[in-house]
Image (tube, rainbow, N blue to C red):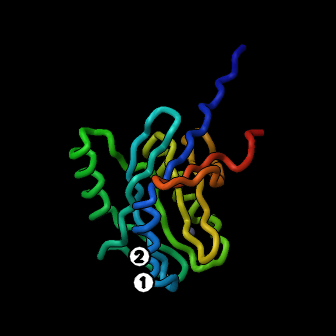
Amino acid sequence: MVLDQPATPPTILLSVKLAETVDADLKLHGHDRERGGILLGLRRGPHLHIDEATLPMRWDIGTMFAFQRSSRGHKELALRRWRQSHKTIDWVGEWHSHPERFASPSSIDIRSWRAITRDRAAPMAFLIIGLERNWIGLCTPDRDAPIRYKEVERSKAGFAFQPAEAKP
Ligand SMILES: [Zn+2]
């Protein structure tokens, strides 16, 4: 009997443009209230190429402890990109900020990520921006826990991330 092997987790590529957008937003608004949005990008072979992040919109609610993203606005932008890109650029993840030095997901984050990933039925990337250190990972529909990623390469175009630990 052959057991189904889960597919190798993709390498996550983040564009410099995305990092700059999020950085500028947090510099402007600070870390007191959580900020967040969705991640837009392409699934290309072994890569999940994340190119753009949406910023909080007026329907969203950010508090010291949570960021509640309304689907309004973000969803419209995701649909627009999907059409403009001839169905290649899609909603591939979410980001939000935490007012803590070393960002790590809360149990609420993990529950919400699991629901999003099951709903999308595809691997989704999740990014938390901390004061000193960010957290990035991937959720897949067949796993309950997110796979934590670490930075493996940095270039002028962006940052590459791979799973932090080898699979058990
Ligand atoms: Zn959180």
**Label at residue 25:** 2
Relative to 33, is 117 above or below? above
**Label at residue 85:** none
What SS does tag 2 mark?
A: helix
How would you rate the neighbour count of disc 1 (Cα within 10 Å): few for under 14, some for 14-19, many for 20 or more?
few
For ligand 1, the image quadrant comes to bottom right
> Could you tell whether 89 is left or right of 84 in the image?
right
Q: Which of the pair 164/117 is nearer the observer?
A: 164
Q: Name the residue under label 1.
A: 29
| Alpha-carbon span between mark 1 and mark 2 | 6 Å
Q: In which quarter of the image is the C terminus?
A: top right
Q: Which of the pair 8/5 is nearer the observer?
A: 8
Task: Please identify the residue farthest to the top as the structure is shown.
Answer: 1
Q: Which residue is drawn at 53% across and 47% down?
A: 12
Q: Where is residue 141 in the image (x, y as percent from the top left)?
A: 54, 41
Q: Position of residue 27 (x, y in %)?
A: 45, 81
Q: Which residue is drawn at 56% across and 74% down?
A: 98
Q: Position of residue 107 (x, y in %)?
A: 63, 64
> Could you tell whether 40 is left or right of 83 in the image?
right
* Three-letter code for the amino acid on which mark 2 is drawn: Asp
Give the number of callouts: 2
